[in-house]
DNA sequence: GATCCCGATACCTGGAAAGTATCGGGCTCT
DNA sequence: AGAGCCCGATACTTTCCAGGTATCGGGATC
């Protein structure tokens, strides 16, 4: 049996007339007659009764018509769904995030993606950098968000944002009165460092910047994530450097101040990583969304 | 798209290797490669990633594989169901009966049919002769059971059974003591006649036989159906002639006696009627069952 | 770096589907 | 009643596409 048979059969059943059905199918009458005969032979069943005015379905034919329509619509649906999936419009995308990245940028990005690709199910996982790379290679996830990447074979990356650093400081500290603060003036302040876990991390970035400014920071505390760090700042345990988006954490007692004489490398990237050989249209669609976001984050995602 | 595409696609997806899939499909590798390319082109979607070791499904391909399997099994089911229906093994058969016919023969017949055709849904309707013919012509039923048929254009018939007549008589009547009873001896007994309704009916048969025997029967009562008639016999209202199978109605006070010197026409047929042009395999199957029943009612349906 | 494996490509062949022409049977309308 | 018409079936031809053979080319393996 052939899909042609089904298509032809449905047309004849609907027109109740082989000639008219042939016109509708843009073929001539004889081949249509033959195809119908063939279908009947193959099934070993009479589907039509030939009358002087045309043809009429037998009861068996009625049954087969239902089945044929069913199959036909299923094929159309399958085609459409597959094409949607091929354009990245349908499916499932597993994405990993780390702790603080989730604060502001990533939710906005996910929201925008969902708006454009409503039938893609995005599943979020929380993983640190090493876990993300392992999960990528094992194909458990398709994309991970992270910072401070080191090149890894088979893994490609793309910048999402590159943010300036801010100083998070307790509002009772005299330095908090200034509109901006130089790194040097923090030499005698205790630092809260984060995140513990896989290296290189933001800890190394902070320490590196201080050393570049001529001092080694006093370490008050090392904590796992940025939220804990800010809560310690609120309690007066010390200060810390954070990315711009962290300032959405409006803890009482904490103020954020820009750094004066900002060195070139006083920025922190937010990037995403993915398998270099991943040709999935879903990933491509998501990366495209990231590029849009990077180029006009304010305009498109207010 | 073509069913071939689906079959080939499924084979390749399962073998993960075009060459091996080609062997399994009993074709050579190049046409298979081309068919897969064609399918991809038509859908506008990459279904496989070509690797040095063979091919691998893309995520889009995985989706399409599910759909393809789905469609494939649906087609197989449709074919099978249609063929069943074509052999009269599946579908719905609307059958009409009249009152007393339902007593014994028809239930046995239906039981036997259901055993051989378990997936045919038999729907019973109660109709008199004229209602049956109207319903047949309107295609509301496919078959009707009846007696004493008159030829009708477009309606064919087939004999089911031809039963002798019995006398139903109250056991207090002296005639009930004899092992058989002649019609003539009933000349002064009151008769219960049935069924009222469309003619010719069993009433005419009874009256005709009496006149043939040389008398006109005294009519005690006309009733609608045989069950009422027998209950009146039990109450001593009179006697009546009934078909053999009616003797399953074992009312207290009623005995059944054969007629002595039985004339040739002291039989009553049970026939079925159907549209002469009805080529339905369901009807054919049922008629066949009737023929089997008629030839060996005792052996096959004890 | 030689070999092997696997998919892709080029070209040819055969068979099936579509086209043209025509038949034949049954209904309709004068 | 008979001519004409409608519709499906059949005979024959043409066209197109699936499938076959031979071969290429690229990546992996030893």
Image (tube, coloured by chain):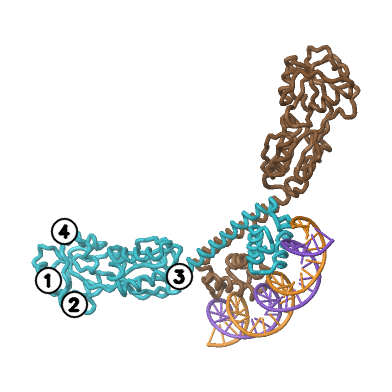
Chain colours: A brown, B cyan, C purple, D orange
Going from N to C along the chain, the mark reached first, 3 or 4, is 4
Alpha carbon of mark 3 to alpha carbon of mark 4: how far? 44 Å
Marks 1 and 2 share the same chain: yes
Q: Residue at x 26, y 62 (%)?
A: B225
Asked if the residue under mark 3 is in contact with the one under mark 1, i.e. CB atoms within 8 Å, the reply is: no
Residue B115: image quadrant is: bottom left
Q: Answer yes or no: is residue B78 visible.
A: yes
- Secondary element at image label 3: helix
The single residue placed furthest to the right in the displayed view is A261
Going from N to C along the chain, the mark reached first, 1 or 4, is 1
The residue carrying pointer 3 sits among few (fewer than 14), some (14 to 19) or many (20 or more) residues within 10 Å by Cα, namely many
Q: Which residue is mark 4?
A: B252
The residue carrying pointer 4 sits among few (fewer than 14), some (14 to 19) or many (20 or more) residues within 10 Å by Cα, namely few
Asked if the residue under mark 4 is in contact with the one under mark 3, i.e. CB atoms within 8 Å, the reply is: no
Residue B264 x/y as whole percent: 22, 79
Alpha carbon of mark 1 to alpha carbon of mark 3: how far? 47 Å
Camera-near label (3 vs 4) is 3
């Amino acid at each position: 049996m052939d899909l042609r048979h089904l298509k032809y059969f449905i047309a004849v059943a609907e027109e109740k007339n082989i000639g008219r059905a042939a016109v509708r199918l843009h073929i001539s009458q004889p081949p249509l007659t033959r195809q119908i005969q063939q279908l009947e032979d193959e099934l070993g069943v009479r589907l039509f009764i030939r009358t002087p005015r045309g043809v009429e379905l037998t009861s068996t034919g009625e049954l087969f018509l239902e089945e044929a329509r069913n199959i036909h619509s299923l094929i159309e649906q399958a085609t459409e769904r597959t094409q949607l999936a091929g354009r990245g419009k349908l499916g499932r995308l597993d994405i990993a995030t780390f702790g603080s990245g989730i604060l502001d940028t990533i939710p906005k990005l996910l929201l925008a993606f969902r708006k454009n690709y409503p039938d893609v199910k995005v599943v979020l996982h929380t993983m640190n950098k090493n876990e993300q790379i392992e999960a990528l290679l094992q194909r458990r996830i398709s994309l991970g968000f992270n910072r401070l990447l080191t090149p890894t074979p088979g893994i490609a990356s793309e910048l999402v944002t590159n943010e300036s650093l801010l100083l998070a400081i307790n509002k009772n500290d005299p330095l908090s009165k200034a509109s901006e603060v130089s790194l040097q003036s923090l030499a005698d302040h205790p630092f809260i460092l984060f995140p513990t876990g896989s290296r290189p991390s933001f800890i190394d970035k902070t320490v590196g910047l201080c050393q570049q400014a001529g001092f080694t920071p006093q370490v008050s505390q090392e904590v796992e994530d940025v939220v804990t760090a800010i809560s310690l700042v609120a309690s007066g345990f010390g200060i810390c450097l954070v990315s711009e988006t962290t300032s959405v954490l409006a803890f009482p007692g904490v103020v954020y101040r820009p750094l004066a004489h900002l060195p070139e490398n006083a920025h922190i990237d937010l990037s995403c990583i993915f398998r270099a050989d991943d040709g999935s249209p879903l990933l491509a669609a998501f990366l495209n969304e990231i590029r849009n976001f990077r180029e006009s984050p304010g305009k498109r995602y207010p």
